[in-house]
Image (cartoon, helix red, strand yellow):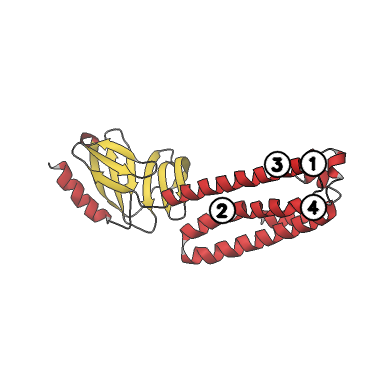
């Protein structure tokens, strides 16, 4: 509940130390801001943001973990665009100085679009393609494995205990990319957590790859791999 706490921490007395932007202004520029009225808005905004973020995430998570993750990231970002726009009315500076806030708003919108696109791309099932000479996993953080390097494939009901992400994406029901396990190994995950058991693939390079998708079962993929390896 960081946002809620923020709504109670900043006061007219400590704003010149705690309020970002305001604490960097000269005394003459601070005099152009109705700080009492602005902080009344600022504090109410953050209390509402914190409560609505918690309630919204809790409700959405009951329906779909992916929606809840997207909401948790994008909602505060877009809320701050509103806060900056509304906060302009408390500033009596020049139009040139005001225009800086619109630049910040534009940057936040662009970042929001970029983050939204990343979620759109990442929260899709990865796909396995068995080509003539290689196995290709398509999608974000995908990889290619030469056919001769695939040494083992089977169905497993469990995943290794993951300590952290190395290079990849983890959000909602999806994990994709390189992850470190609790015992220090690096494994590749391309999984939809709602779809299990998982396909486990091992290679001559000691790669350990876990895959699942709600579009095809792990058992079906094992059958396809058997046929592919026997060609």
Mark 3 Cα within 10 Å, few/some/many (few <14, many 20+)?
Answer: few
For the point 25% across and 45% down, which residue is it?
129
Instruction: List x then y, in percent, for residue 75.
Output: 59, 56
Is label 2 in contact with label 3 (beta carbons under 8 Å)? Answer: no
* Tag of residue 4: none
**Nearer the N terminus, badge 1 or badge 3?**
1
Q: Nearer the viewer, residue 59 or 38?
A: 38
| Dot 2 alpha-carbon crowd within 10 angstroms: few under 14, some 14 to 19, many 20 or more | some
Query: Does the image show residue 40?
Result: yes
Mark 3 lies on a secondary structure that is: helix
Q: Position of residue 221 (x, y in %)?
A: 24, 51
Circle 1/circle 2 CB separation < 8 Å: no
State left or right for residue 42 relative to residue 151.
Answer: right
Q: Determine the residue positioned at 74% across, 44% down.
A: 98
Instruction: Please report whichever mark, 2 or 3, sits nearer to the chain's N-terminal start.
Output: 2
Find the distance from the CA under tag 4 to the CA under tag 2. 26 Å
**From mark 1 to mark 3, how far is it between C-alphas?**
16 Å
Q: Is residue 198 left or right of residue 32?
A: left
Which residue was labeled with disc 2?
74
| Viewer-closest of 121 and 66 | 121
At horizontal 52% and vertical 64% (from top left) the residue drawn is 60
The numbered mark, 1 or 4, whose residue comes first in the sequence reads 1
Whether residue 182 is visible, yes or no, is no
Helix, strand or loop at label 4? It is helix
User: Distance from label 1 to label 4 (Cα)?
Assistant: 16 Å
Viewer-nearest residue: 183 or 82: 82
Q: Seen in the image, is 212 located left or right of residue 48?
A: left
User: Which of these two is toward me, 227 or 85?
Assistant: 85
x and y, in percent, of residue 63 in the image:
47, 66
Mark on residue 23?
A: 1
Marks 3/4: CA distance?
15 Å
């Amino acid at each position: 509940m960081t946002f809620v706490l923020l709504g109670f921490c900043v006061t007219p007395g400590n704003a010149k130390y705690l309020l970002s932007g305001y604490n960097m202004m000269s005394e003459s520029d601070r005099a152009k801001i109705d700080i009492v009225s602005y902080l009344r808005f600022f504090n109410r905004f953050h209390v509402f943001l914190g409560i609505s973020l918690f309630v919204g995430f809790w409700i959405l998570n009951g329906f779909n973990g992916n929606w809840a993750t997207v909401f948790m990231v994008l909602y505060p970002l877009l809320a701050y665009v509103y806060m900056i726009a509304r906060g302009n009315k408390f500033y009596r500076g020049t139009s040139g100085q005001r225009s800086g806030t619109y630049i910040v708003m534009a940057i936040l919108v662009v970042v929001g679009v970029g983050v939204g696109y990343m979620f759109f791309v990442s929260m899709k099932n990865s796909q396995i393609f068995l080509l003539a000479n290689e196995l290709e996993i398509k999608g974000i953080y995908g990889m290619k494995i030469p056919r001769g390097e695939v040494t083992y494939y089977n169905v497993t009901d469990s995943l290794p205990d993951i300590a952290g992400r190395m290079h990849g994406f983890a959000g909602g029901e999806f994990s994709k990319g390189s992850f470190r396990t609790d015992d220090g190994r690096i494994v590749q995950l391309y999984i939809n957590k709602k779809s299990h058991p998982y396909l486990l693939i091992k290679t001559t390079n000691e790669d350990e790859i876990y895959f699942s998708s709600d579009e095809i079962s792990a058992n079906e993929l094992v059958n396809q791999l058997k046929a592919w390896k026997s060609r």
